[in-house]
Image: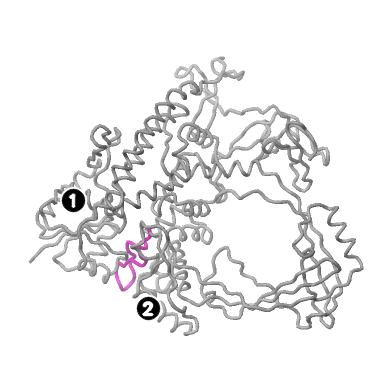
Amino acid sequence: MARYLVIVESPAKVKTIKKFLGSNYVVAASNGHVRDLPKSQLGIDPENDYEPKYITIRGKGELLASLRKEVKRADKIYLATDPDREGEAISWHLSQALKLEGKKVYRISFNEITKSAVKASLKNAREIDMDLVDAQQTRRILDRIVGYKISPLLWAKVKRGLSAGRVQSVALRIIADREEEINAFIPEEYWSLDADFKVPGEKKLLPAKFYGKEKKMNISSKEEMDHILKDLDGASYVVADIKKGERVKKAPAAFTTSTLQQEASKALNFATSKTMRIAQQLYEGIDIKGNGTIGVITYLRTDSTRVSEEAEGSAREFIGEQYGKQYVAEGGTGKKSSGKIQDAHEAIRPTDVRRTPAVLKDSLSRDQFRLYQLIWKRFVASRMQPVRYEATSVKIEAGEYQFTAAASKIAFEGFHIIYTEAEEEKKEGGVLLRGLEEGVKLAPESFDAKQHFTQPPAHYTEAALVKTLEELGIGRPSTYAPTISTIIARRYVAKENKNLYLTELGEVVNNIMKQSFPSIVDVNFTANMESLLDGVADGQVKWKTIIENFYPDLEEAVKKAEEELENVTIEDEVTDEICEECGRNMVIKYGPHGKFLACPGFPECRNTKPYLEKIGVRCPLCGKEVVVRKTKKGRRYFGCEDNPGCEFMSWQKPSGEKCPKCGNYMVEKGNRLVCSDHQCGYTENKRKSENI
């Protein structure tokens, strides 16, 4: 009997796939990559046409020896690594490491780990796609060049153990730029005016909002608001126009990697790394009671919303049976994204729509169930009719001004019968009063004038950062989670209450990258590099051409930076703080969490203590010094040196000046001083101290 060897990446898939194939099939796992560039050197030879040097990954020797024995006994070898560029590259490395040249070797891939998909892949076996391999190889080499050329500079400039990366450095810059926007933001005052009107013959009041005159008015001060209220006093209020119409909300597309990470963050509070880890488990196979191990979702790294005809038909049939024909969407609802990398894949969906979350609940962990339920509901909703609303808008004339009122009610719930996005407004406007007609005079019951201040841009969350990276064309589905994990692990960024904050260490690294390697952290440059990698995958661009154009410029930038950065290397700064153990003046050192005080007598004296940097401003509460402090996760703030005795803290730097309007302390924002009390809103120029 013929003997066939199937090699997959993950051991978790072995059991699942073995169940689908006959006894003459042997299924083994490579445990991911088996070869890589050496850790001890660059691994690319610029003098020899940039030829990469690959070695067996440490610890993979025994595994490869075992696979070679299986290869000798096999009549055919099927390389069944993941269906993406990285999977294609792993298949190629396996063919090289196992010396498969001259043997019957086939590449197979499947978007879902189900019996039908695995069987179909064997019928559609092909050769390794070297264009995809070269695209992945180029990415790996570019990342290696950036990391191995720039990281030593960061070690010399700041501390050992830091790293730079082609994608991670851009992600860090995006977060740093947002932090600058927030710090420089000056709140602006604005006012709103709401009113309640009594409609003749109705008990309920009609709520309305002030609009303005012919165009919408922005009210920016109390004086303006008082003037408007004075004009409205004694005005007649008449319903001038009523418009009725229909509003439609289309069903969302099935999940891509990016949208799954975003929605799981918002709806389930999952970090991107957690989402991908659990999705991997659902893809590789779950032990379902009575059915054995089955993959319950399709491949999790994709930027396409396309769905197979079989899955489309199955979903429509299921919706018609469970909810009624009127809920089934008309025509196709999926569309391809502009990215080319994963477009051969489908969107992330359940492998069988009839395998509902309720059916699987007893077979899944709590987090697996919650993520599967999110994926299942989103897919089913994507094949359903839109939500339709009956919308009514009313224009109320009040002298020379206008008020507007609006209401809507659901006419047909469509996909909302099963799915509502996390950020979607769940409550709709109230139904307008029946007695409302054009020409009806209204009586004002009350006015509510409120003062507001504009808010700064929000700090990035993981979900928002993933969305931005995708929109800018930076990285690909497989890179989002590891990129974010890296900048958090390196302590360049601190994560608190979902928000990502730049740390002092991150600020230093970002400034070095912007100063010495502007192209590496340039958003457009990095996005263009992704397009070139797409060109390699399509067979339009030669991979070594990209390396040839990239390497010399980076090499020159590194040499220039080495000369310049040597002159600004951080030296130990001597302080007035005396070491209690040996009497020396302590010095400022840099560690993983930023600055700290250390005895210069190391290693004889190992005394260290926290460094509290004074900013030359007295605490507004107790009069002691204000110092720079950090949260446990590395985010910088300003607090009293007497903490915890004094509770003063501020995210913005206190200026030492008092607000002339309300007496609160002022903080620095860019070139302005701003009152710490937003309700006050007072600002003045930092240099000229002129009232604005």
> Three-letter amino acid code at disc 1?
Ser
Q: Is residue 571 left or right of residue 81?
A: right
> Three-letter amino acid code at disc 2?
Gly
Q: Is residue 366 above or below residue 436?
A: above
Q: Is residue 412 above or below residue 149?
A: below
Residue 313 - label: 2
Q: Is residue 643 above or below residue 608?
A: below
- Residue 343 within the magenta-colored segment of the rendering: no
Measured as percent of width and height from the top left, residue 173 is found at 51, 41
Question: Does the residue at mark 1 contact the one at mark 2 (Cβ under 8 Å)?
Answer: no
Q: Residue furthest left?
A: 1
Residue 333 quadrant: bottom left
Q: Secondary structure at mark 2?
A: helix
- Picture quarter with the N terminus: bottom left
Provide the residue span drawn in magenta.
281-301
Residue 278 quadrant: bottom left
Task: Specify how the rendered protein is coloured.
Answer: one colour
**Frontmost residue, 628 versus 368:** 628
Q: Is residue 338 left or right of residue 210?
A: left
Q: Residue furthest top?
A: 583
Measured as percent of width and height from the top left, residue 615 is found at 67, 28
Residue 87 quadrant: bottom left
Residue occupied by mark 1:
95
Measured as percent of width and height from the top left, residue 113 is found at 30, 65
Say which residue appears at 22% left-offset and 64% top-offset.
18
Say which residue appears at 87% left-offset and 61% top-offset.
229
- Residue 290 within the magenta-colored segment of the rendering: yes
